[in-house]
Amino acid sequence: MRHAHEDPELQALVRRYVTPDRRYLRLGGHLLKLTGAERALFSHELAGAAAEITPRELTVLLEGGWRERKTAAWLIAVAGRTAFRNRLGELLLASEGPYAGAAYCVALANFGTTADAELLSAYLDRYLRRPDLYYDQAFALGALLYLDAQLGADHSGRFLTPGGLWQQWTEGPPSKSYEPQAYLPIVGRLCAFAQESADLL
């Protein structure tokens, strides 16, 4: 992992794409609270950054910490840069740090293909077997449900069968009270924002 305080190239990219107006904090659930005017302005800003950033710069951001990775994943989602699909899948599966996993899920859900569903499924196959870990299991399943709805598929069904991996994970130990269907509209609204921004490119 590269660290901005030690890496001038990464530091310059953080100043340019990650920290302006605290962008990295506004990406994700905070988007759902924006007013119409705030949403339109932020969407324009995000579209501009997504159009401007190069593949090389995105690669560098994905080598940074959670702020850099989260921002890069959103810029990838908005620009529809599917060349990063496998890299996002690798980062999601590695789960090396907090806060960025949901952004990877949004990008994969936004790409909207069976290949993306397979990457989310691989994550769930690994981490639903670990009831001791509270990572991005619920968000990943919400993204998979979203993809199923878009694709007319049922990749999520095997995780949700009685006694299946989702039930095993939520029942713990320790037990958890996550409802995957609650994440479906959240993922849908975040993908809608990414698409609104993409339409401005």
Image (spheres, grey):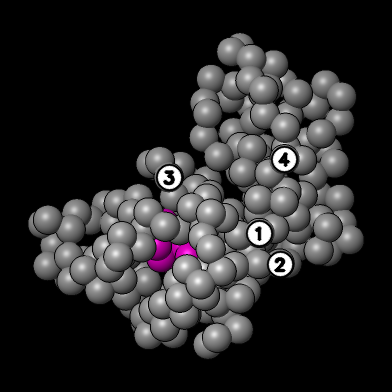
Mark 3–mark 2 Cα distance, whole angstroms, equals 22 Å
Mark 3: secondary structure: loop
* Marks 1 and 2, the one that precedes in the sequence: 2
Locate residue 59, reporting x and y percent: 36, 69
Amino acid at circle 4: Ala
Q: Is the magenta stretch mostly helix, strand or loop?
A: helix
* Marks 3 and 4, the one that precedes in the sequence: 3
Mark 1: secondary structure: helix
Mark 4: secondary structure: helix
Locate residue 70, reporting x and y percent: 41, 57
Residue sitting nearer the eye, 133 or 183: 183
Task: Identify the residue under disc 3.
Answer: 99
Q: In which quarter of the image is residue 119?
A: bottom right
Q: Quadrant of residue 36?
A: bottom right
Task: Identify the residue under disc 2.
Answer: 112
Q: Quadrant of residue 126?
A: top right
**Tag of residue 182:** 4
Residue 189 lies within the magenta run: no
Mark 1 or 2: in front is 1
Residue at image coords 51%, 60%: 34
Mark 3 or 1: in front is 1
Amino acid at circle 3: Tyr
Amino acid at circle 1: Arg
* Marks 4 and 1, the one that precedes in the sequence: 4
Mark 3 or 2: in front is 3
Check contact, mark 3 vs mark 4: CB within 8 A: no
CA neighbours of label 1 inside 10 A, class few (<14), some (14 to 19), many (20+): some
CA neighbours of label 4 inside 10 A, class few (<14), some (14 to 19), many (20+): few
Residue 187 relative to residue 22: left or right? right
Residue 117 relative to residue 88: left or right? right
The boundaries of the magenta stretch are 70-76
* Marks 3 and 1, the one that precedes in the sequence: 3
